[in-house]
Image (cartoon, rainbow, N blue to C red):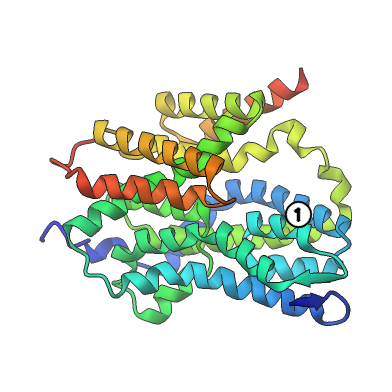
Amino acid sequence: MSVETLGWGPLLIVTIMAVVTLATRWGGVFVMSFVPIGQRVRQFIAAMSGSVLVALLAPLAMQGDGGARLALATTAGVMLVLKKPLPAIAAGILAAAAFRQL
Amino acid sequence: MPATEMPPLQSELNRQLVWVGFRQMVPIAMFVMVFGAAFGLAATQSSLDATWVVVMSTLVFAGAAQFATLDLWGPQVPILPLALTVFAINARHLLMGATLYPWLRHLPPAQRYGVMVVASDANWALAMQSFGRGQPGLGLLLGGGLALWLFWVLGTWLGTQVGDVIADGRRWGLDMVMGCFLLAMVVGGQKNLRMLVIWAVAASAALAAYRYLPENSHVVAGALAGGLLGVMWTEQSHER
């Protein structure tokens, strides 16, 4: 099934996208409201929260160009030393920009 | 207080905390505005009307999914592939909601779900980091989310008007802002041998899924692998 992109069609398309996205934002909270939060669930959540980020970043580090890898390495390095996010992010972006000017 | 109980103090949510969260997110939101402009430009180039592009950013507020669905736009848009693409890319929100639940559950349902409307990668990561330090985080989630949303919509609109200005953003490393931000959150979080092993497993699972499983399944696969290991490998004590 398809929707025409003439007239009000785009509004229907955007609404479908918005509803699906909202369902993902609410779904996790909704499901958890039926799960008793015990020690195991708490451990699962704690381990998963870092893992979401790592899983997002892993392909970026593996498939990215040299600039992307250099940016991530620089950010990690500066963050370990300074422990402040903004300088770490700025250094990462500068590294990518410098690499891509070459 | 039993170990399983999160202190309700961390779930505090008031005007001041939201404002603090908003201000704290503005530097990152400025970059999100550039993403927004890139999206606005790409969308108008995919022959979407500028009005609908802005409406989409306002109502959907999910950059990666919005970019991905641009490929589907034509004289007709197929509904099922559209919905599946949006769901797959945004499935990570399910995990974010679940990880926030121990703190969200202290709020009345209307606030609980209201706050989640603006949940996205950056403000979720900031909120979780704050919870990890034993500080309140829901103000960062809501305030930061509002900042991201505002600048995302503003950037989208700018992109539909004067998009050519940022056409070369990649050359200046601007595509790396979100990656570097999220990595800074990971590195700034709890670090010990157990956590590092969990992250390594999550990364390996994500890469394997990226390679062998359907598109966009890698985040969910990696997060679940890391989470399951976290259940099996019991934490000894609260080390840092």
Q: Who is closer to the viewer here, B188 or B201?
A: B201
**Figure quadrant of the C terminus of chain B:** top left
* Residue positioned 76% across, 59% down in the render: B70
Residue B84 visible, this orientation: yes
* Residue positioned 81% across, 64% down in the render: B73
Query: Label 1: few (<14), some or many (≥20) within 10 Å?
Result: many
Question: Residue B4: where, in percent of width, then height?
Answer: 16, 60
- Taking the image as shown, residue B133 lies to the left or right of residue B118, namely left
Q: Which residue is mark 1?
A: B39
- Seen in the picture, residue B11 relative to A91 is either above or below; the reply is below
- Seen in the picture, residue B7 relative to B238 is either above or below; the reply is below
Query: Secondary structure beneath disc 1?
Result: helix
Q: Quadrant of residue A20?
A: bottom right
Three-letter code for the amino acid on which mark 1 is drawn: Phe
Check the image and name the residue furthest to the front. Answer: B212
Question: Residue A18: where, in percent of width, then height?
Answer: 63, 72
Question: Residue A10: where, in percent of width, then height?
Answer: 79, 75
Check the image and name the residue furthest to the top. Answer: A102
Question: Residue B119: where, in percent of width, then height?
Answer: 50, 62
